[in-house]
Image (cartoon, helix red, strand yellow):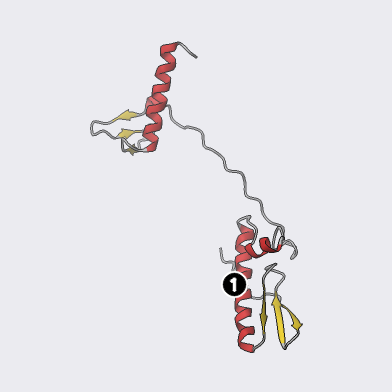
Amino acid sequence: MNHTPSMIPLTVERLPGNRWRVATPLARGWSAVVSTPHELARATATAFREVEVAAYARQRGATYDMARLEGVQNALVAAGTPPTARPPAVRRPRRHDPMAWRQMPDGRWRCPSGRTFRADAQQVLNVIKLREQMAAKSLTGAA
């Protein structure tokens, strides 16, 4: 997804000593102080980049770094765009019975879906551990 804006609002505040403060409401917390046309051009380019970073952070459900420094919870709330919440992570349940896995003659293991795994793969180690737990339960008569 492209977050690059084609136009952004800038506010320019006159400061003492022939200087100006440039800021944008789309990147709360960011500002630059300039005194020459070259610095103004550089600050404008930086403002575009900061707005892009703030939009990316908003899409990811994170707080924009400069807004965090200023204490603003979300950089774009002031612009009328509420953050989107990320759904909570879901842990997938085990899909195959550990007893359905088969060890092949070359030492690799084949799961019921047909995929093969090295003997030292974490999936295989988990299956072996579960098989041992199941065997221990059957020996003790625990349900």
Quadrant location of the N terminus in the rendered image? bottom right
Q: Residue drawn 76% across and 83% down?
A: 14
Question: In the figure, 37 relative to 73: above or below?
Answer: below
Q: Nearer the viewer, residue 40 or 71?
A: 71
Q: Percent from the top left, x then y, of residue 80?
A: 75, 63
Compared across the picture, whether 54 is left or right of 129 comes to right
Q: Residue drawn 75% across and 85% down?
A: 16
Q: Percent from the top left, x then y, of residue 137?
A: 44, 16
Mark 1 is surrounded, within 10 Å at the Cα level, by few (under 14), some (14 to 19) or many (20 or more) other residues, namely some
The amino acid at mark 1 is Arg
Element at badge 1?
Answer: helix
Q: Residue drawn 30% across and 29% down?
A: 103
Q: Determine which residue is flagged by label 1.
A: 49
Question: In the figure, 90 relative to 112: above or below?
Answer: below
Total marks placed: 1
View extreme (top): residue: 141
Q: Nearer the viewer, residue 71 or 127?
A: 71
Q: Place residue 133 in its image quadrant.
A: top left
Q: Place residue 28 in its image quadrant.
A: bottom right
Q: Percent from the top left, x then y, of residue 143?
A: 50, 14
Question: In the figure, 105 relative to 71: above or below?
Answer: above
Q: Percent from the top left, x then y, of residue 131?
A: 39, 24
View extreme (left): residue: 106
